């Protein structure tokens, strides 16, 4: 998909802070994170949403989600994690390339976890620093 920002990231045509990659999936930091370490994980092959993916590919993607989530948790020392995935405009999907949000959560980052914190701005140096910590945490998974 020529206009898909996530396909451009997969092809290396757009800048991103990659924290994990395997044959089928790619994980990178959200550029407007809800919290430090907010990561997106996508299939490398373009699918608008989960409903268009073959079930075996959904399974492979979620194995990667679990692996990356554990690395994000270790790297950020989060108190909890939200794993989110939306399908369709009515479900608030904004980029129509299947993706899963891995959002580290911290005590008192919102109203008792009932709402999401405000999105934050991070510069490239800050993204690279947390990205490096996450990459190392994913690689050293025990």
Image (cartoon, helix red, strand yellow):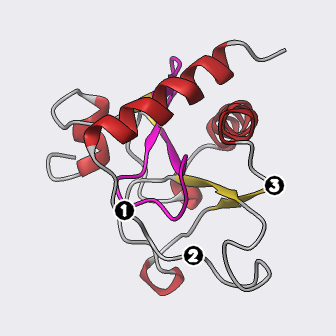
Say if mark 2 contacts mark 3, CB within 8 Å: no
Say if mark 3 contacts mark 1, CB within 8 Å: no
Q: Image point 81% across, 55% down: which residue?
A: 79
Image-quadrant location for residue 55:
top right
Q: CA distance from mark 2 to mark 1?
A: 23 Å
Q: Which residues are magenta?
A: 19-42
Q: Position of residue 128 (x, y in %)?
A: 37, 31
Q: Earlier in the sequence, mark 2 or mark 1?
A: 1
Q: Position of residue 74 (x, y in %)?
A: 74, 33
> Would residue 7 be found to the left or right of residue 105 on screen?
left
Question: Dot 2 lies on which element?
Answer: loop
Q: Earlier in the sequence, mark 3 or mark 1?
A: 3
Question: Is residue 49 a member of the stretch shown in magenta?
Answer: no
The residue wearing badge 2 is: 117
Q: CA distance from mark 2 to mark 3?
A: 14 Å
Q: Position of residue 85 (x, y in %)?
A: 60, 63
The residue wearing badge 1 is: 96
Q: Nearer the viewer, residue 131 or 47?
A: 131
How would you rate the neighbour count of disc 2 (Cα within 10 Å): few for under 14, some for 14-19, many for 20 or more? Answer: some
The residue wearing badge 3 is: 79
Q: CA distance from mark 3 to mark 1?
A: 30 Å
Question: Dot 1 lies on which element?
Answer: loop
Image-quadrant location for residue 96:
bottom left
> Would residue 133 be found to the left or right of residue 96 on screen?
right
Image-quadrant location for residue 116:
bottom right
Q: Earlier in the sequence, mark 2 or mark 3?
A: 3
Q: Image point 69% across, 35% down: which residue?
A: 56
């Amino acid at each position: 998909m020529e206009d898909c920002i996530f396909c451009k990231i997969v092809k290396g045509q757009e800048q991103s802070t990659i924290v994990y990659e395997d044959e089928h999936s790619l994980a990178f930091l959200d550029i407007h994170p809800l919290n430090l370490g907010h990561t997106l994980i996508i299939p490398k092959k373009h699918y608008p949403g989960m409903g268009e993916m073959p079930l075996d590919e959904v399974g492979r993607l979620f194995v990667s989600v679990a692996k990356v989530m554990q690395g994000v948790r270790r790297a950020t020392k989060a108190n909890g994690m939200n794993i989110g995935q939306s399908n369709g405009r009515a479900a608030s999907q904004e980029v129509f390339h299947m993706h899963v949000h891995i959002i580290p959560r911290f005590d008192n980052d919102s109203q008792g976890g009932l709402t999401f914190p405000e999105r934050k701005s991070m510069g490239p140096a800050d993204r690279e620093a947390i990205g490096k910590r996450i990459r190392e945490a994913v690689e050293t998974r025990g």
